[in-house]
Amino acid sequence: EAQVTQNPRYLITVTGKKLTVTCSQNMNHEYMSWYRQDPGLGLRQIYYSMNVEVTDKGDVPEGYKVSRKEKRNFPLILESPSPNQTSLYFCASSLLVGNEQYFGPGTRLTVT
Amino acid sequence: GQNIDQPTEMTATEGAIVQINCTYQTSGFNGLFWYQQHAGEAPTFLSYNVLDGLEEKGRFSSFLSRSKGYSYLLLKELQMKDSASYLCAVRVDYGQNFVFGPGTRLSVLP
């Protein structure tokens, strides 16, 4: 089944403890993105990747890192999480640049 | 700056027609997308406009006016399962940079 998967789906952590949220797609998509979704603010793009080893900042990249070492994987790294990073995170991929995106199921992160 | 506006909430009756508006002021424009998001789920793609005019897809249609910075999503023959949030998104460059609106929560009543 063609899909985008994210792990973990739920995570509660403490301030400053490094964490990684994984994202993987099996559709051979070139383009991938990370978003966070907060009430009243909608989806905001954190980082995106146009190809292996090619990543760019979105609108809210502060406090996040990404890597794209393989086409199928695009992990999101929080080196020192803070409570304002408590949010619902979505990974997405698309076959063609600027085209419709396929979203993963989301990761709900709580930082205390 | 980037600004996309949508009504926060709308209510409509089963079988009716509803129009969800989206206005945008963005640094660039290379297409407008509509996504549907049911509570607790991921967004799913509904429609895409890059040129002015109407795109029809079954019960869903989307309209774009680039000169006015305006789009709407039209849902016909509403069904209970159409109760969801509807997200408007603009592709702001020639790459993969997207800006989303805050979303409109639609409730369909029997």
Image: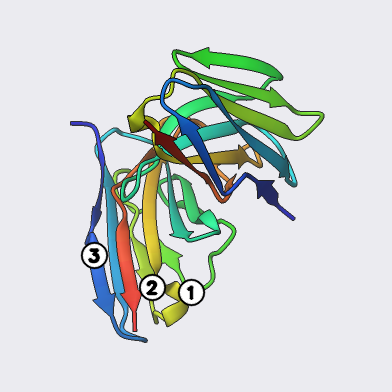
Name the N-terminal-most of marks 2 and 1: 1
Viewer-nearest of discs 1 and 3:
3
Q: Residue at x 29, y 52 (%)?
A: A23
Residue on which disc 3 sits:
A10
Viewed as shown, does residue A90 lie left or right of A41? left
Which residue is at the front of the view, A36 or B108?
A: B108
Q: Exactly how many numbered labels are in the figure? A: 3
Is mark 2 in CB contact (under 8 Å) with mark 1?
yes
In the current view of this chain or complex, which residue is farthest to the right? B67
The image position of residue B24, as x and y in percent, is 71, 42
Q: Quadrant of the N terminus of chain A?
A: top left
Badge number at residue A63 = 1
Quadrant housing the C terminus of chain A: bottom left
Query: Which numbered disc covers residue A78?
Result: 2
User: In x, y percent, where is residue A46?
Assistant: 50, 59
Q: Chain of mark 3?
A: A
**Which chain letter goes with mark 2?**
A
* Amino acid on which disc 1 is placed: Gly
In the foreground, A52 or B11: B11
Q: Single out the residue that lies furthest toward the front.
A: B110
In the rendered structure, which disc, 2 or 3, sits on the residue that comes first in sequence?
3
At label 3, which amino acid type do we have? Answer: Tyr
Under circle 2, the secondary element is strand
